Image: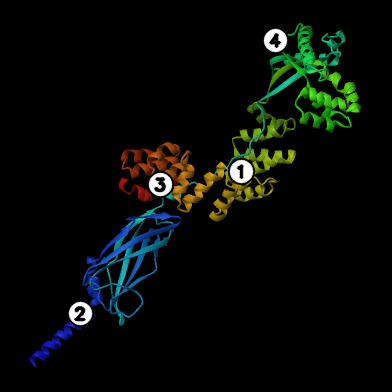
Amino acid sequence: MKSLKTLAAAALALTAVACSSPEKMAKQAENVTVTCEPAVLEVVAGKIEATVTVTYPADYFNPRALLEVTPVIVYDGGEAAAPVLTYQGEKVKDNYKVVSKDGQTVTEKLTFDYVEGMEQSYLELRGVAKKAKNIKKSATLPSKKVADGANTTYMLVKTSGALSYKADAYQDVIAQSAEGQILYSINSADVANKQLKAQSIKDFQAALDEIKANERKTLKGTEVVAYASPDGGEELNTKLSDKRSVSAEKAWNKVVKGKEVAAPEVKSVGQDWEGFQELVSESDIQDKDLIIRVLNMYSDPAVRESEIKNISEVYTELKKGVLPELRRARFIANVEYKNYTAEELAALVDENIDVLDEEAVLRAAANAKKLDKKIELYKKAIEKFDSDRAQYNLAVAYLQKGDNAAAKKALAAVKADDADVKNANGVLALRNGDLEAAAKAFAAAGNDDAKANQAVVDILNGNYSAAYAALKDQKGCNAALAALLTDNVDAVYAKACSCPHGSYIKAVAAARQGKADDVKKYLEVACKDDALKARAAKDIEFADYR
């Protein structure tokens, strides 16, 4: 009987142990080891991913037990739980992951959606042990903190987008010329007196006087250029042209007598095929297209002349109306005209905009410091000149102002669909958070702005290496951030500007390198911006420097 009592007592003891197994697992939870990679959580592309490794020691996991583990991120303002992870002992007949009584290591990959406030957070595991056949009997395991979080440094990327205005063709200095000419008789190098009194020479003399009187004009040089008509043979005409250059220079001295004009550069061209083609093109000669084809087919002057003479009727017209105009010498004054200054343009757009052409109005808009003034002037250029460049620039100005709705409307009215327009549409998509549409637009644009903007998409998508490859030769906050995110920390300082945003990125770089004095120095600049100051107070990058 005694042996039966002993056996009964032993059976009761075993039953008690089995029944208390959830409590036992809870009490021995401290023997379970947990590691997390990374130890400091990081937000990438709006997600927090972590790999948790749990090692259960031998004799810990009861063969008939269930263990429900809930990964939870606890943050300022709430909690976010991942799906429950359920494990079972070896004797449980279910479909969960089995953990051996002899001890086992399990690894789980966790993913959480980022929520604002997770900048200050931690990841913990919450467990509940249960009996498989009596799940109402359970024991709550102590929560186990496994990681701190969360690093949101990639969110420092500037998403306003790179945009360039279309350039105007306004010239600060305009090259101009004044010109007169004298004509010669066939095969002659003598200047007839009447040529010096011709209207062409009178106009040239008047132009010289006007240049001197006009403070915007500066005479930069003068030329005398002599020619021969392309008939009569190349050798003869070369000599004739040379003689004409000599007589023309003497005539020049008479024409400019009493005027403050520097000595001219004298040139002899010889046969004037270029002038010949120009005059033929502008003429009413019936077969002028045939003549021009001959000029294009043959480069040898003798062959050209022979072929043209073969067109007998045409050649007769040439002798009367074209060739005499090529027996000449040109008097040329080269002038620089000083266009309106930025200050003058600024006054004229308000006082007398009608005197300005499209390029001048576009330049005035480009010079304007305030966006509202740019917008006003681009609207005037659209109204006055139907300027498509102004229409596009208006959209850019609205984008820079942050008025995306107005920018979209202005962009829709642009007639061109070039790389700039595609890039601007990509910026609109980027600002709306449509990264797929933005990437498609930037790929279609393919210009430098689009490549820089694609790097922003890459950062937002977590493709930091692609972003750094695109921006490694550039400077600016996004280029510095791409260097930081790819652990090219030393490159950050040269790339980041000295603005508060750039200084914040440099402060993070200094923190990662353990440079406390530099962290303080850069944060002093960064914290002049209230938003960055508030961020720094919570940023896990500076956890060791508070």
User: Label 2 crowding class (10 Å Cα cut-off): few <14, some 14-19, many 20+?
Assistant: few
How far apart in space, not on screen, are marks 4 and 2 (Cα)?
A: 117 Å
Q: Which residue is mark 2?
A: 17
What type is the residue that disc 1 sits on? Val
Query: Which mark is first along the chain, 1 or 3?
Result: 1
Query: Which mark is first along the chain, 1 or 4?
Result: 4
Q: How was the colour assigned to the protein in this rendering? A: rainbow
How far apart in space, not on screen, are marks 3 and 2 (Cα)?
A: 54 Å
How far apart in space, not on screen, are marks 3 and 1 (Cα)?
A: 31 Å
Query: Which mark is first along the chain, 1 or 2?
Result: 2
Q: Which residue is mark 1?
A: 396
Residue sitting nearer the eye, 284 or 357: 284
Of the two numbered discs 4 and 2 in the rendering, the one whose residue sits closer to the viewer: 4
What type is the residue that disc 4 sits on? Ala
- Residue 298 as seen in the image, left or right of residue 23: right
Judged from the image, the secondary structure of the residue bearing numbered disc 2 is helix
Q: Which residue is mark 4?
A: 262
Q: Where residue 238 appears, x then y in whole percent?
A: 76, 15
Q: Are marks 2 and 1 in contact (CB under 8 Å)?
A: no
Q: Where residue 462 appears, x then y in whole percent?
A: 45, 53
